[in-house]
């Protein structure tokens, strides 16, 4: 069965430090992968997506993610975290043609001043 | 610039009461969705509507009904609320562009508490 795993429930980093949030997926066909961010009390907003082509994708707010088929991973990175990046981050897979995303359980990011 | 609008934002119900969550989008999207978000479980799809006039069950449909009223509006109804339905509910929409190109736009959420 398809699944998305975000192994880190909580991550704390200092402002200015680099960030990597992990995402692993299990899906038999070509994956379509997404990262969404949820600020407190808000809905989810798309950060970036991977459909095909270049395995390093750039998103909004200075985020990037790298698709590694051999590791079934789509990790999210940011070189220098800002206090406003504190939020919950969700990785998702689109099981193509079925309208059904599979979301990971989320990683809550805390940023220390 | 409204995007996806959900009402109400907060609701407290007693067990057995009914209510309807309303959702409207102004982006002319074909597809609409209802998710619930529970701590440690991410988002789970309740129902979706691929296009006007169609609805289908998602991962956790029991206890819910939906109506795709028109292209803009997609409502979620709890006929007899249970404490297990305490959750944050999100409506989303998308312009389906083919396999894998299904970017969701979310509403701000509706927090429901069932006592």
Image: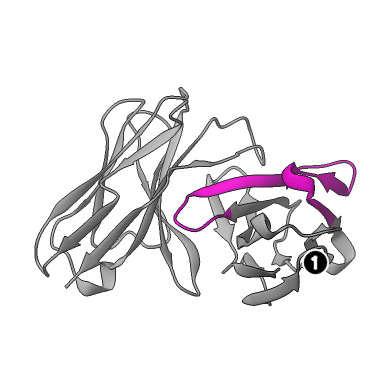
x and y percent of residue B10 in the render? 26, 55
Please report the residue visible at 68 percent of the width from the left and 51 percent of the height from the top. Answer: A34
Please report the residue visible at 64 percent of the width from the left and 70 percent of the height from the top. Answer: A110
Q: Chain of mark 1?
A: A
Above or below residue A56? Residue A69 is below
Q: Which residues are magenta?
A: A38-66
x and y percent of residue A76 in the render? 77, 59
Please report the residue visible at 18 percent of the width from the left and 62 percent of the height from the top. Answer: B12
Please report the residue visible at 61 percent of the width from the left and 60 percent of the height from the top. Answer: A90
Using the image as rendered, state which of residue B78 and residue A106 is in the foreground. A106
A4 falls in the magenta region: no
Using the image as rendered, state which of residue B36 and residue A16 is in the foreground. A16
Which quadrant of the figure has residue A14? bottom right
Which quadrant of the figure has residue B50? top left
Q: Crowding at label 1, few (<14), some or many (≥20) Cα neighbours within 10 Å?
A: some
x and y percent of residue B103 in the render? 60, 39
Secondary structure of residue under mark 1 = strand
Lateral position of residue B49 relative to residue A45, left or right? left
Instruction: Tell me if residue B34 can be seen.
Output: yes
Q: How is the image coloured?
A: one colour
Using the image as rendered, state which of residue B11 and residue A28 is in the foreground. B11
Residue matched to label 1: A20
Above or below residue A97? Residue B86 is below
Quadrant, the C terminus of chain B: bottom left
């Amino acid at each position: 069965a398809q699944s998305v795993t975000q192994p880190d429930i909580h991550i704390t980093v200092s402002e200015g430090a680099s960030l990597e949030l992990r995402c692993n997926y299990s899906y038999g066909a070509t994956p379509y992968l997404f990262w969404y961010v949820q600020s407190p009390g808000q809905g989810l907003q798309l950060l970036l997506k991977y459909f095909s082509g270049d395995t390093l994708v750039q998103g909004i707010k200075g985020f990037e993610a790298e698709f590694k088929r051999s590791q079934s991973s789509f990790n999210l990175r940011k070189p220098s975290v800002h206090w406003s990046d504190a939020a919950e981050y969700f990785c998702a897979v689109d099981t193509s043609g079925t309208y059904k995303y599979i979301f990971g359980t989320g990683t809550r990011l805390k940023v220390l001043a | 610039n409204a995007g996806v609008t959900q009402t109400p934002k907060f609701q407290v119900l007693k067990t057995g009461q009914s209510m309807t969550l309303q959702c409207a989008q102004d982006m002319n999207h074909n597809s609409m969705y209802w998710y619930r978000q529970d701590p440690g479980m991410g988002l789970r799809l309740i129902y979706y509507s691929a296009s006007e006039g169609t609805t289908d069950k998602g991962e956790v449909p029991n206890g819910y009904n939906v109506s795709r009223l028109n292209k803009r509006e997609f409502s979620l109804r709890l006929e007899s609320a249970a404490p297990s339905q305490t959750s944050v509910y999100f409506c989303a929409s998308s312009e389906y562009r083919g396999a894998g190109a299904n970017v969701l736009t979310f509403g701000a959420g509706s927090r429901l508490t069932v006592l």
